[in-house]
Amino acid sequence: MTDAKTLLQMAGADLTPPKLSQATLVLIDIQNEYLSGPVAVSGARAAIADAADLLARAREAGAPVIHVAHKGRAGSLFDRDAERGQIVKELTPRPGETVIEKGLPNSFAGTDLDARLKATGRKDVLFAGFMTHMCLSSTARAAIDFGYRVTVDAAACATRDLPDGRGGAVPAATVNDVALVELSDRFAVIARSARDFS
C-alpha cells in the first residue's frame, strides 16, 4: 500500500457515492460512433452494460436523467442524423428525459446543461460515458466550477489507445486509468460500479 493521498482525501472530503434518489445522472456521448471505426473505444460493450444497469437503477430511484450526445457535421464523425451518431440502443432516452447535443468536449460549453442541472435542485451529479480522457473528463472538471459535487462511475467509462508522440501508443486501459486517477485527485468521487450506488 502507498501513503499517497488525493487532495480530496487530504481535505477530508466525503468520498461516498451519492444515493441515486438524490443525484442527477448524466450520460455523456455513449453513441454508436464509439463501437467501431476510427474512434472505437476499448471495452465499449462492458461499459455500456454497466451504464445500462446504472440507468435502470437511476430510473427506478426517480433520479433525473440527462443524455448528452456529441453532434458532428453531416457525413462526418458523430453525424446525429446517421446511425453512427445515435445514442446506443441500450441507453435509448425515454420520453421526458433530457437530450442535449454539444459540439465541444465540455458538455457545459455552448449548451444549457447547467440550467438543466440547476432545475433539478440537486448538487450531486453522476457522470458516465465516453471518452474518459476527453469529454467525460472535461465535463467533470467544469462541473465543479458550477458548484456541483461530481461522481464518476468508472465501470461505465471507456476510451481508446492514443499515440504517445514517440512513434508508439499508450494503451486505452492506461489512458482510462490515468484519466480517472487525475479526476480523483480533486474533481470527482470515483465509484467502481453501478452497484456502488444505493
Image (spheres, rainbow, N blue to C red):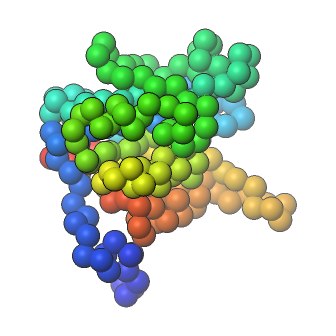
Image coordinates of residue 165 in percent, x first then y, are 80, 62
Q: Residue 182 or 144: which is nearer the viewer?
A: 144
Residue 132 is at least partly visible in this image: no
Image coordinates of residue 127 in percent, x first then y, are 38, 44
Q: Residue at x 47, y 51 (%)?
A: 142
149 horizontally vs 61: left or right: right
Up/down of 120 relative to 174, above or below:
above
Up/down of 2 relative to 93, above or below:
below
Location of the N terminus (image quadrant): bottom left
Q: Residue 123 or 170: which is nearer the viewer?
A: 123
Q: Quadrant of residue 167?
A: bottom right
Residue 37 is at least partly visible in this image: yes
Q: Residue at x 21, y 38 (%)?
A: 121
Q: Residue furthest right?
A: 167
14 horizontally vs 78: left or right: left
Q: Residue at x 32, y 80 (%)?
A: 10
Q: Residue furthest bottom?
A: 3
Q: Residue at x 41, y 67 (%)?
A: 186
Image coordinates of residue 141 in percent, x first then y, are 47, 55
Number of marks in the rendered image: 0
99 horizontally vs 177: left or right: left
Image coordinates of residue 100 in percent, x first then y, are 46, 26
